Amino acid sequence: MPLVHFFETSFGRTYSRRIPLVTVHCEGVNGWGECVAGEDPFYSSEWAETAWPTITHYLAPALIGRNLESARDCVALLSRVRGHRMAKAALENAVWDAEAKQRKMPLWKLLGGTRSEIPCGVSIGIQDSVEQLLEKIQVELAAGYRRIKIKVKPGWDVNVLEKIRSRWPEITLSCDANSAYTLDQLEHLRKFDQFNLLMMEQPLWDDDIFYHGRLQKELRTAICLDESIVSARKAAIALEIGACRIINIKVGRVGGFSEAKHIHDICLSQKIPVWCGGMLESGIGRAHNIALSTLENFSLPGDVSASKRYWKEDIIEPEVKVSPQGTIAIRDEPGTGYRVKEDFIETLTVRKETVRAAQ
Ligand code: OSB
Ligand code: MG
C-alpha cells in the first residue's frame, strides 16, 4: 500500500508498506491481525519477510486445532519460538479479535479498557527542508492533534527544534531519535533540555537500557523508551534503574496484547505514564492500537492518528477519523468495531497461504 507521504526516520525512508495480515478462523468467527514488522530489518531485526515463514512454519501450527479458554492462552503455545514478537502479535491479536466477536463484546472492553475516546498525537518524519516540516506541523495542529512528535537525527535536531519553538513556544512537543545517538554525544543531547519537550524517545542503542539510565540522570527532559522495551521484564528493569520516565507501548514490538497489558499494569503501579506507539499500520493494526489505548494508564496522546494521514483508502470501514479536538471516539460494536474490507484486501494481495489443522 503506497503511503500518502513518505515517512523518514533516522534509519531511512519508507514510501509504501508491505503488510502481512493474519486471519484466524475460530468456530464461525474470523479474527484479524496485522504484523507490524517493517519492509526492512532497520527498526528491528524482525521484518516482513521473516514474519511470513515464522508464522506459517511455526506459530500457526502451534495454535491450529487447539481449544483455547481465551486469547491469552496463545502466549504459552507460542513461547517455544524465541523472539519474532511481531509475528506472534499478529496471531495473538487476531485471536483476541475472534474472542471478542465470539463473546459479542467490543475488543476494548475485553482488553479491560475504560476510555470512551482517546487523545491523539502525530509523528512527523524528517522532511527535505525545515520549511516543509513547519508546514506539516501547521496542518496537524489545525486538524486538532494534541501532541507533535518529530523525528530527529544528528544534523536534523537542535536547529529544527529551535525553529519550531520560536514559532510555537507552547505546543506539546516531543522528539524521537530511533537510536541515532551515542553517549559520547551527551553535551549535544543536553541542548535538547532547553526546548521543554514532553519527552525524548529512544536516543541511544535499540537494545540498550543501562546507558539510557546514565543519560536520564544527566537530562531534565524525560526519556521515553520504544525499541528497548520488548517485554514486561525489560520494562521492569528500565523502571528499576531509572532508564526512562515514560514508556511507548507498541503491541507488535512486545509480542501481543497480553504482554502489552502486562507492561501497562507495571507502569500503572509505578505511576509511569504510557502511550501507544505506531508502526504506520493499516486499519487493522490501527483499530487494535485504538482498543489498547482505552486502558487507563494510556494517559499521553499516542501515535494513533487518522487513516487519511497514511492511506488514500484504508482497508477497514469506516476509516479512522480524528475529531477537531484531537480524539478518536471508541466504537461499541463487537470486535474492533471496524469492518475489514476483504474484497479490497484481495485486490492488494500479492501472496497468500492457508495453514490447516491435520485431518
Ligand atoms: O519509532 O515510533 C517509531 C514508524 C515506523 C517505525 C518506528 C516508528 C514509527 C513512527 C510512526 O514514529 C508512528 C505512526 O504514525 O504510525
Ligand atoms: Mg519510536
Image (cartoon, rainbow, N blue to C red):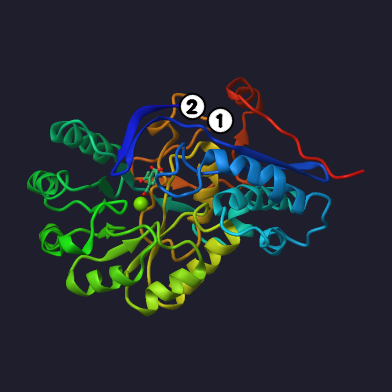
Q: Residue at x 26, y 45 (%)?
A: 151
Residue situated furthest left in the rendering? 166
* Location of residue 248 in the rendering, given as x and y in whole percent from the top left corner: 40, 59
Q: Quadrant of residue 206?
A: bottom left
Give the residue furthest to the right: 359
Task: For the residues labelled 2 and 1, say whether their Cβ atoms are less than 8 Å apart.
Answer: yes
Residue 98 rendering spot, x and y as whole percentages: 71, 48
Count neighbours of disc 2 (C-alpha within 10 A) and say few if under 14, some if 14 to 19, many if 20 or more. some
Is label 2 in a helix, a strand or a loop? loop
| Residue located at (45% from left, 43% from top) | 41
In the picture, the quarter occupied by the C terminus is top right
Q: Is residue 34 visible?
A: no
Q: What residue do we see at 62% from left, 40% from top?
A: 52
Q: Tell whether circle 1 marks a residue whose Cβ is less than 8 angstroms from ligand 1.
A: no
Choose between 290 and 163: the one closer to the eye: 163
Q: Which mark is residue 1?
A: 2
Q: Above or below — where is 212 with respect to 323?
A: below
Q: Which residue is mark 1?
A: 315
Amino acid type of disc 2? Met
Eyeballing the image, is 188 above or below 215?
A: above
Tally of numbered tags: 2
The secondary structure type at the circle numbered 1 is: loop
Apparent side of residue 29 relative to residue 130 in the rendered image (left or right): right
Q: Quadrant of residue 132?
A: top left
Residue at the extreme top: 347
Q: Around disc 1, counting alpha carbons within 10 Å, would you say few (fewer than 14), some (14 to 19), or many (20 or more)?
A: many
Please state which of the two labelled residues, at mark 2 or mark 1, is closer to the viewer.
Answer: 2
Specify which label sits upstream in the sequence, 2 or 1: 2
Residue 170 is situated, as x and y percent measured from the top left of the image, at 15, 53
